Amino acid sequence: MSTTSHTSKVANKPKDTKKSFEPRILAMCCNWCSYAGADLAGTSRMTMPPNLRVIRVNCTGRIDPLFILQALEAGADGVLISGCHEGDCHYVSGNIVSKKRFLFFKKMLEEFGLGDRVDFVHVSAAEGDKWAAITTEFVERIKKLGPTPVKNVTNLSDISVDDDHSRKARIHELLVSLSNRLGYQPKKPLHFNPDEVAEGYGFPKRDPDKCIGCYACYNVCPEDAIKIEDVQNKRRYGTLHAHCLVCKECEKVCPQEAIVISPGFELLSFLLNEPLWEFEVPMQKCSECGEYFNPKPFCEHLEKKISEKKAKESLEDLHLPFKPYTTCSACKRKKLAQSVAEVAHPALKRMK
Ligand code: FES
């Protein structure tokens, strides 16, 4: 009798998922320090959790953010990166560059609620005990967090990329995929401090006082990252962050030196494929038809240039039938055709 009741109690006991959960953790270790440290912990028979799959890389500088994102997208419950101590990197500064990149991506992952599932640590070849302590603590942390919230875990696909452009495109793809799988709804722009942004991420910063509203930057952008839109009496300028390659072509071509490419990142527009609209310039109304046609600063710039060339008087001597700086090109053509016809008509009449 007592045995039966005990059995049913055990059967009805709710399953403690957190306790039975064994996280799958990917660890990426530098060959020269941390991998040897992990090896030392093993050969010294230290107690360590069996939840880690260790990948050896030559230096943490080799760890592309793609590897971390792809591991999380593929369903890893946590990702641990371990390298040499600062100043000890076999390749001088690989770990410093890698850590900066890591912190940049961790910030994005924090926004997704995955920030606590990734970590960057330093373990030397002599620190087997430190490796054992870190991995034990990391596994405990992930156990407390529970299984990854990334839904519809995928199988790993080939992540080979041949250039910076395809790497960036793939990172964009993975972040969008992660945000979809998490059901992440961005509510507000998330800006990053320029010092926290990894190399290769930036966008044009325009000086509204210098920009005259021409299309020079737009025309030269190889990735269609610069967006210009005329809305009623304003022309607005924006950048599509996911597309910007930081090639600086727009900076080189701007006639007003109004653009500087600065490091920066904005998660919302990066994920949504929406440009971040930065500023607007007012448009000039045509003195003939009343339509908005060119940005006002552009017309003023034109007038200033003509004055500087001392050609303003000669232009006035022509007695043009329209105002040269404030008439749209369609009205200019129409007005010119009209005056030509007015001159030609009496002469043609006489010839008849
Ligand atoms: Fe170890 Fe660079 S060689 S982090």
Image (cartoon, grey):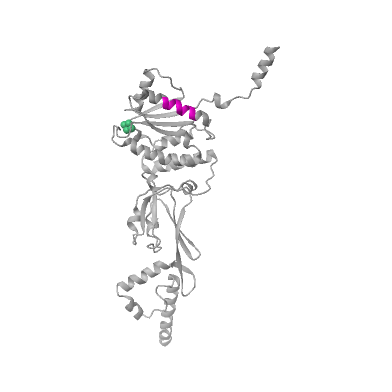
Above or below 296: residue 224: above
Residue 291: image location, x then y, percent:
49, 70
Task: Look at the picture and state if 179 lies above or below 54.
Answer: below
> Which residue is found at the position 42% from the left and 27% from the top?
134
Q: Quadrant of the C terminus?
A: bottom left
Pinpoint residue 109: horizontal percent, then vertical percent. Answer: 47, 39
Name the one closer to the observer, 19 or 180.
Answer: 19
Q: Position of residue 341 (x, y in %)?
A: 43, 80
Q: Tell me, yes or no, if residue 46 can be seen here.
A: yes
Q: Nearer the viewer, residue 258 or 99?
A: 99
Q: Is residue 157 visible?
A: no
Question: What residue range appears in magenta?
Answer: 133-141
Quarter of image, ligand 1: top left
Residue in view at x 38 percent, y 21 percent? 41
Of residue 128 and residue 154, the one placed in the foreground of this image is 128
User: What is the number of callouts on the image?
Assistant: 0
User: Considering only vertical position in the picture, is 88 above or below 260?
Assistant: above
Q: Is residue 306 magenta?
A: no
Nearest the eye: 129 or 301 = 129
- In the rendered image, residue 262, in percent from the top left (x then y), is placed at 37, 51
Tell me the chief SS of the magenta region: helix
- Relative placement, left or right, of 14 versus 97 is right
Q: Residue furthest right?
A: 1
**Dividing the image into 4 quarters, which one contains the N terminus?**
top right
Residue 225 in the image: above or below residue 255: above
